[in-house]
Structure formats: structure tokens, C-alpha cells
Image (spheres, rainbow, N blue to C red):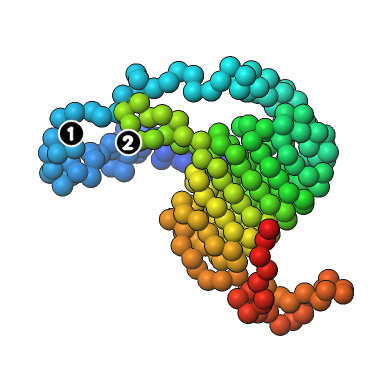
Amino acid sequence: MGESSATTQAGGSAGAEGVVGGGRAEDESARISPTNAELRGESMERFKSAKIFQRLDLTSPGPYSREEYKKKYLWMIVYHLVYKMMPRRSRKTRVRILRAFGATIDDTVILRPSAVIWHPWLLTMGANSCLADGVTIYNLGPVFIGEHTVISQNTYVCAGSHDYTQPNLPLTRPTIRIGSGVWVCASAFIGPGVTIGDNAIVGAASVVTKDVQANMIVSGNPAKVVKERTMAKIDPNSGSTSERSETLAQEPTHEHS
């Protein structure tokens, strides 16, 4: 039993190293190959430009104000030494810490300790909303999240970019607005300046670079409308749902103030 196991382990290890019959043999699958263009016989000159437009030596070394840098450094210390080390059940304490740094968030929000928030003072979250494990709120610009909205695991909300039409790539800080009753599924990317309407769903691993209308389901890269969200009718007296479902387009709409 032991010998058989040892032989199997040795064989597996040897296979990984390309050892056959006690001598070394080159594994064809392990060879380094050229680029696809080189395999097609194309010249690398067609991928070169006479002038390089982008100049990283001209970028601003300090795009924020002195006061913002002070808040950023203090938040970084508190986040790494306190906030993310707290137990999952310490939700209320995390809410208090974020509020101390200027966040506008309801008492009922759920904040997982592994969710990263770059600038708490630029975050607004409504009642009963949730940032799940591994979420990144890269809020160089303001991020607004409505009520009853779920931002699922490993989603990246990116409210920051650079103006690529300028050689020094100046920082841009556009706002992102995510409505109420929204479900952003796992590993999605929400791009700068995007607005996502109420009751929308963003499919897993989708890349959202354009606005999403209310009540719509979008998915893909880039995200496109799949269909309108279908919801069960809710009994206003009991709060329970009926068996029959209808699209929200068949229901009367209400303007939000």
C-alpha cells in the first residue's frame, strides 16, 4: 500500500517535470511560444507608433488636497488595523466607524469586513443594503447606493478613471448611482459615471459601462439588456407573494421625488 502510494506520487511529480524512464525529456506542451501575430508571420513594426502620446512622467504626484490625504492616511490605518479585523457580527461597530469618517449610511446596512471602501466620506447607502465579501468600492468620486440593494461578492464599483485624451492622464472622479432594490451579482464591474435604476439586476461577472434602466436585467461584457425583471405580486396586507408573476411594465409606475 505504501509502496504503491509512493510510486504514484513519484510518477505524478515526475510527469510534472517531464521525466520519462529516468531521463529528462522535453515536454512539448511546456514550450514558450511566440505571440499570435508572430505565429502569423506579421512584422512587429505594425504595432509600433512613431510617437508615444502617453507621458507618465507628467502625471500629477498629488491629485488630492492636503486635507483629503490626511483623511486617506488615517482611514487606511483604521481600516487595516481595526475595521477589517473585526468579527463579521460587528456590523453596528463598522457602521459607526464609517460614519466617523463621514459616510452617510443607515443603521440597517450590512457591511462585510472584507469589503474595501476607499473613501468612506464619499459613500451613501440606504436602509437594508449590503456590501458582500470581497466587494471593492473604489469611490474616488461619490457612490450612492439606495435601499434594499445587494452588491454581491467580489464586485468592483469603479468611480475613478483617467482622461486618456490628455498625455498626462489627469484623474477623473465621476459619480456612480445604484438605485433601490438592485441586485448586482458576483464579480460584476460597475464603471465610472454609471447609473443603475431601481429593481435592476446585473448578471454575474458582467461589465457595466452604460446606464441601466429601472426594472431591467442586464448581463455580459459589455452588459446588455436580457429582459425585463419579473416579480411576483405582493399582497399589501400580508406581505406574501402570490403564485402569479407579472412584469413590472404591467404595473402602474410611480415617480420618485
The one nearer the camera, 133 or 219, is 219
Q: Is residue 221 above or below residue 247?
A: above
Where's the C terminus, which quadrant?
A: bottom right
Which residue is farthest bottom?
244
Q: Is residue 72 left or right of residue 99?
A: left
Q: Is residue 229 left or right of residue 237?
A: left
Q: Residue at coordinates 28% horizontally, 38% vertically from top-left?
A: 31
Q: Is residue 186 above or below residue 119?
A: below
Q: Residue at coordinates 56% horizontally, 20% vertically from top-left?
A: 65
Q: Position of residue 231 (x, y in %)?
A: 67, 73
Q: Are marks 2 and 1 in contact (CB under 8 Å)?
A: no
Q: Position of residue 94 (x, y in %)?
A: 78, 35
Where's the N terminus, which quadrant?
A: top right
Q: Residue at coordinates 42% horizontally, 34% vertically from top-left?
A: 162
Q: Position of residue 19 (x, y in %)?
A: 36, 36
Whether residue 2 is visible, yes or no, is: no
Which residue is farthest right?
238
| Badge number at residue 48 | 1
Q: Position of residue 200 (x, y in %)?
A: 60, 62
Which residue type does callout 2 highlight?
Thr
Q: Residue at coordinates 31% horizontally, 28% vertically from top-left?
A: 167
- Tell me where residue 68 sits by quadrant: top right
Q: Secondary structure at mark 2?
A: loop
Which residue is farthest front?
257
Whether residue 29 is visible, yes or no, is: yes
Q: Secondary structure at mark 1?
A: loop
Q: Measure how far apart labels 2 and 1 are at the Cα level.
A: 19 Å
Pair 2/1: label in front: 2
Q: Earlier in the sequence, mark 2 or mark 1?
A: 1
Name the residue tied to disc 2: 165
The one nearer the camera, 112 or 128, is 128
Which residue type does callout 1 highlight?
Lys
